[in-house]
Every structure is written in structure tokens, then in C-alpha cells.
Image (cartoon, rainbow, N blue to C red):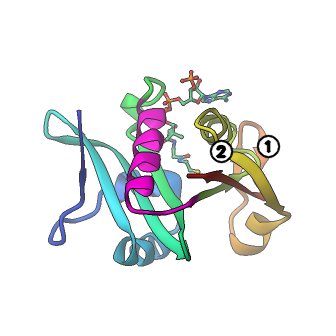
Amino acid sequence: MLIRKLKKDERPPMTLLLLADPSRSLIEDYIKSGECFLAEAAGQVIGVYVLLSTKPKTVELVNLAVDEHFQGKGLGKHLVNDAIRVAKAMGYRRFEVATGNSSLGPLALYQKCGFRIIEVEHDYFVKHYSEVIIENGMRCMDRVWLSLEL
Ligand SMILES: CC(C)(COP(=O)(O)OP(=O)(O)OC[C@H]1O[C@@H](n2cnc3c(N)ncnc32)[C@H](O)[C@@H]1OP(=O)(O)O)[C@@H](O)C(=O)NCCC(=O)NCCS
């Protein structure tokens, strides 16, 4: 498996990116200003992550997704650890990520990679998304921020 940067003239893997973020327009925005990395195996894109510089010395993991056929095999953790390595190499000091209160998998994954919960924005998903999001039998309502000092 190879992890590489999306080339300037290459189309982003929209189907994969939409697994992590239902907003196509938001994805198109952050793909333009961020750095997109692809995980490839046998010429097929099986994972993606996107880094976006947000504040001085701070980078955010704005998208992380693994193809459904390849989930649960350690690739998500491998990509988060690769993103941490890349962020450090780019000189960032703080790494942030946000997810939903009902996203139990990502909440476990980020904490297993060293991130700590720093803030909860109550009702973020109620206010900003028109559709009701249900995951793991729970309504996704609150945005949970996690961070890692690099
Ligand atoms: C989230 C996602 C990237 C994880 O990728 P993955 O390849 O399936 O993850 P991994 O196999 O590397 O597993 C990650 C870790 O989280 C743990 N984990 C996952 N779900 C868990 C749960 N419900 N409870 C506890 N631990 C859980 C796994 O056990 C694993 O830890 P381990 O290595 O110590 O066993 C993938 O499921 C995905 O693309 N989901 C859709 C998009 C998405 O939700 N993106 C995140 C947006 S914030």
C-alpha cells in the first residue's frame, strides 16, 4: 500500500470523501485550500485524508475515509498515524480533528492515536445540517473536538 499526495490535475476521490462528510460543497472548498493524501493498493484508491491549515501552527484533519471493503483492518489507524507524521514534518505544533458525538468508531480511533477531547459544541449538527443524522442508534447532535500536541 502506498500513500501519496493528490496531484494538481487529478480528481479527488469524491465517493470516498463523501463517506466522512455529507457536504459536497464543503469538500470542494477544503480540497482547494488543503492537502489531500490517497492510500492506494493495486492501483485502486482505498483511503483518503485531508489536512487543512486553520490557525498559526495548527492543522486540522478535515476528512478521513477508508473504502468500506477495507475498513476494520487497521488502515484508518495507519492513515491517522501517517497524517500525524506528515503534520509534524510540515512544522505544525497542534493537530485538531472534529467528529460527532455518535461517531463511536472515529472517537475511539482518534483517542487510540493520542488525541484528547478538548471541546464539545452542543447542537452543532442540529443547527447546521438539515437532515437528522443517526449513527449507532443515537442522534448525532454535538460536535466533539479533539487535539494532539505535536
Ligand atoms: C473511521 C474510519 C476511517 C476507520 O477506518 P478503519 O480502517 O475501519 O479503522 P481501523 O481498522 O484502523 O480501526 C481503528 C481503531 O478504532 C477502533 N474502533 C473502531 N470502532 C470502534 C468502536 N465502536 N469502539 C471501540 N473501538 C473502535 C478499532 O478497534 C481500531 O483500534 P485497534 O487498532 O486498537 O483495534 C472508517 O470506518 C471510515 O472511513 N468511516 C466512514 C467515514 C468516517 O466516518 N470518517 C471519520 C469522520 S470523523
Which residues make up the magenta segment? 75-94
Q: Secondary structure at mark 2?
A: loop
Judged left or right of residue 116, residue 13 is left
Picture layout, residue 87 above or below residue 44: below
Q: Say if 54 sits above or below 49 in the image.
A: below
In the image, the residue with mark 2 has its CB under 8 Å from the nearest atom of ligand 1: no
Q: Position of residue 64 (x, y in %)?
A: 47, 50
Task: Name the one closer to the observer, 64 or 135.
Answer: 64
Relative to 135, is 128 above or below? below
Badge 1: residue crowd in 10 Å (few <14, some 14–19, many ≥20): few
Secondary structure under the numbered disc 1 in the rendered image: strand
Residue depth check, mark 1 versus mark 2: number of the one nearer the observer: 2
Q: Is residue 150 above or below residue 53?
A: above
Q: Residue at x 41, y 46 (%)?
A: 85
Query: Residue 100 location in percent, x, y?
Result: 71, 53
Mark linked to residue 115: 2
Which kind of residue does numbered mark 2 sit on?
Phe
In the picture of the structure, the residue carrying the numbered disc 1 is 138
Q: Main secondary structure of the magenta part?
A: helix
Q: Which of these two is toward me, 27 or 54?
A: 54
Q: Earlier in the sequence, mark 1 or mark 2?
A: 2
| CA–CA distance in space, label 1 to label 2 | 23 Å
Amino acid carrying mark 1 in the image: Met
Q: Is residue 9 magenta?
A: no
Visible residue check, residue 142: no
